[in-house]
Amino acid sequence: MLPFIIVIIVVVVLVGLVIASYNGLVRSRNQVENAWSQIDVQLKRRLDLIPNLVETVKGYAAHERETLTAVVEARNAAIAAPDTPKAQANADGVLSGALRQLFALSESYPDLKANQNFLALQEELTATEGRVAYARQFYNDSVLTYDNKLESFPTVILAKMFNFESREYFEADEQARTAPTVEF
């Protein structure tokens, strides 16, 4: 009778470990999905601010059409980019470079630099950039935790059995890592 009770206890403990490990994987996967949606929300918020910023700048720097066109094209490319970390990171890098050039224009136009609408939009965009950076970091931390679970024993066995897959980090492309060249 004692060996039977020991076997039952071992089986119950093993089943409990399997359930806890599986649920941990599901929680981590859901955390990654949530973190990705937060990046998406902040990127969309930034994309919504850009048309107002471009319209404000147009009134002061109409002959800087090339820079304004680059910002609009980068925004449109970001909207059309596939919903993957790599594609979004690439589109984000191009858009960030175009925005840096747009803000550099304000240095040449004192009236624009003093315009309350421009300053408010610039401040809102700067705050949104901070939120995007935080959301990226949170996403990458969530991916790290999830991927660590996928590669750790005993969850690695369950991960392979139930087809849990590693997630891609949100990384800046090479273009976003270099400062843009601004010429007037």
Image (cartoon, rainbow, N blue to C red):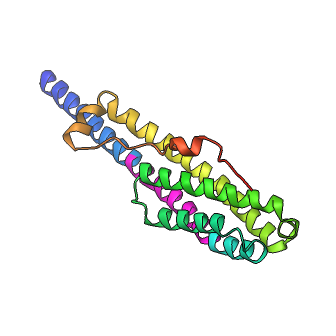
- The image position of residue 56, as x and y in percent, is 74, 75
Residue 60 appears in the rendering: yes
Q: Residue at x 65, y 63 (%)?
A: 67
Q: Quadrant of residue 165?
A: top left
Q: Quadrant of the C terminus?
A: bottom right
Q: Is residue 105 left or right of residue 136?
A: right
Asked whether residue 35 is drawn in magenta, I would say yes
- The image position of residue 182, as x and y in percent, is 70, 51
Magenta span covers which residues? 29-49
Q: Residue at x 51, y 40 (%)?
A: 141
Residue 127 appears in the rendering: no
Q: Which residue is more in the foreground, 135 or 48?
A: 48
Q: Which residue is more in the foreground, 47 or 152?
A: 47
Asked whether residue 89 is drawn in magenta, I would say no
- The image position of residue 9, as x and y in percent, is 22, 30
Position above or below: 19 against 51:
above
Q: How many marks?
A: 0
Q: Is residue 2 left or right of residue 76?
A: left
Q: Which residue is more in the foreground, 125 or 80?
A: 80
Q: Quadrant of the N terminus?
A: top left
Residue furthest out toward the top: 3
Q: Residue at x 70, y 68 (%)?
A: 64
Position above or below: 53 against 74:
below
Position above or below: 52 against 80:
below
Q: In terms of secondary structure, what is the magenta stretch mainly?
A: helix
Q: Residue at x 17, y 31 (%)?
A: 8
Q: Is residue 136 left or right of residue 157?
A: right
Q: Quadrant of residue 17?
A: top left
- The image position of residue 6, as x and y in percent, is 19, 24
Q: Quadrant of residue 58?
A: bottom right
